Image (cartoon, rainbow, N blue to C red):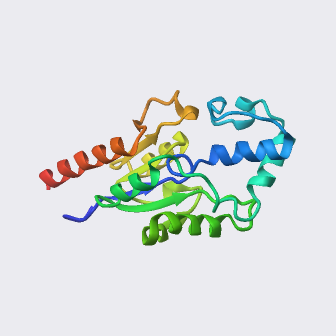
Amino acid sequence: MKEHSLPRLLMDVDGPIANFQKLYLDSLLEATGIKKTEKEWDEWDTMKCLGLTVEQDKAAYAIVSLPHRAFNMSVHPGAQKGVLKISTITDLYFVTSPLDTSPTWQYDRNQWLRHLFGELGRKVAHTADKHICSGEYLVDDKPSNLEKWSAEYPNSTPILWDMPHNESTTEFTRVSSYDELYKLIADENLKRYNQG
């Protein structure tokens, strides 16, 4: 980190900001008539935890992948305001996995981020390989992303966004609100400033 510059924070989108689970579950209901809840989605293996077949999962993803679905995703309560607040103390970039089955996902996601965050929404990288992006912080709800990233950047801070599907993970700093995240980063910024 450069002296007196803001630390770079890499922010996952699906999970901390966008409610991908709701989009998927609504699509599952539309495609198959199967109704499941977000509370049932308590591990990363979606088909296993929801008791779905490969065909049912593919049917749901066919709906998820339709044009404009990424633009119409729900925002988790407090996410818009929280991200904007955190962007005042970090150099924030959105790092989000593309959905290869959708021809418009990246465009729709970009428009969605710009709609919510204005110019900040232009600072986005579409990659499933988040470990190629450098920064002082990565906030993600997927433990394997944090594992790969922290191996690549051992002096940086991986932060796990608390979700039902990652409750069994204990090896990362965990936050469940934007107020917690803001306090964590503000405290770290103060330590870095005092050390340097």
Figure check: 7 above or below 162? below
Figure check: 149 above or below 104? above
Figure check: 99 above or below 142? below
Q: Residue at x 58, y 34 (%)?
A: 165
Q: Residue at x 48, y 60 (%)?
A: 94
Q: Residue at x 56, y 32 (%)?
A: 164
- The quadrant the N terminus occupies is bottom left
Q: Nearer the viewer, residue 158 or 164?
A: 164
> Residue 15 appears at what percent x and percent y?
55, 46
Tally of numbered tags: 0
> Residue 80 appears at what percent x and percent y?
45, 55
In screen coordinates, is 159 left or right of 165? left
Q: Residue at x 58, y 60 (%)?
A: 127
> Residue 33 appears at what percent x and percent y?
84, 39
Q: Image quadrant of residue 103?
A: bottom right
In screen coordinates, is 173 left or right of 32? left
In screen coordinates, is 42 left or right of 114? right
Q: Image quadrant of residue 98?
A: bottom right
- The quadrant the C terminus occupies is bottom left
> Residue 105 appears at what percent x and percent y?
67, 64
